[in-house]
Image (spheres, coloured by chain):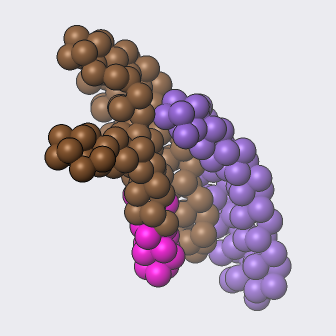
Amino acid sequence: MELIAKVTVICIVVALTALLLERDTPELGLLLTLGAIAVVMGFALSYYREIQEMVETLLGQAGLDGALFLPILKIIAISMVTKLGGDVCRDSGQKALGAVIDLAGTFCSLLAAEPLLRTAMSMLTQMGGIG
Amino acid sequence: MDIDLIFKIAAIGIIVAVLNQLLVRSGREEQALMTTLAGLVVVLMILVQEISDLFDLIKNLFQL
């Protein structure tokens, strides 16, 4: 709760200041937004360890392999970076660059999910008696 | 990540915007452009390190 209040206040102050800066120097407004993203992401990610521990406990209780969860983590990170990068480009009016970042993110996510897909395929072939 | 970074960038931005306005009103558009460029480079130099730190943090946390 403390985190969300802090993040909301920071973001509103930054949005107002960026509006002020964008009248004369739009590029500095964008850089201010980028700085705020770095700071707020740093705050949010500082809580990540607790979430990871909770997920590992749940996986242990369910008797699942932790390695299966790794691709999901990677895809979360890729989508975070892709979403932020794409939206920063779109905010500065470069929609094509945003679309390229989205596309690259999609490919990276597919690559990261490849071990999961391979495992699922081998399970299916074993169940079907094909392999 | 420190919140001072945001205040630092906002302060530089406001100073540059004011200088830009003053120089434009006094008919020195080239110097106004140079001031804006200088501000941009200074902020970029501060920010590149922070963005790099953020990406390193994401890489380490998510084992990318």
A10 or A97, nearer to the observer:
A97
Q: Give the colour chain A carries in the figure.
A: brown
Q: Which chain is purple?
A: B
B31 or A131, nearer to the observer:
A131
Placement of B34 over or under B49, stated as above or below: below
Asked which quadrant contains residue B53, the reply is top right
Q: Position of residue A45 (x, y in %)?
A: 45, 31
Q: Position of residue A70 (x, y in %)?
A: 42, 33
Does residue B20 appear in the picture of this structure?
yes
Tell me the residue at 54%/33% (across/down).
B63
Placement of A72 over or under A82, stated as above or below: above
Is residue A55 found inside the magenta-colored segment of the image? no
Q: Position of residue B26 (x, y in %)?
A: 75, 83
Tell me the residue at 37%/23% (across/down).
A66
How many badges with numbers are in the image?
Answer: 0
Quadrant of the frame with the N terminus of chain A:
top left
Magenta segment: A83-103
Is residue A94 found inside the magenta-colored segment of the image? yes
Tell me the residue at 65%/66% (across/down).
B18
Asked which quadrant contains residue B27, the reply is bottom right
Placement of A40 over or under A81, stated as above or below: above
Q: Position of residue B13 (x, y in %)?
A: 63, 58
Does residue B6 appear in the picture of this structure?
no
Magenta stretch, main secondary structure, is helix
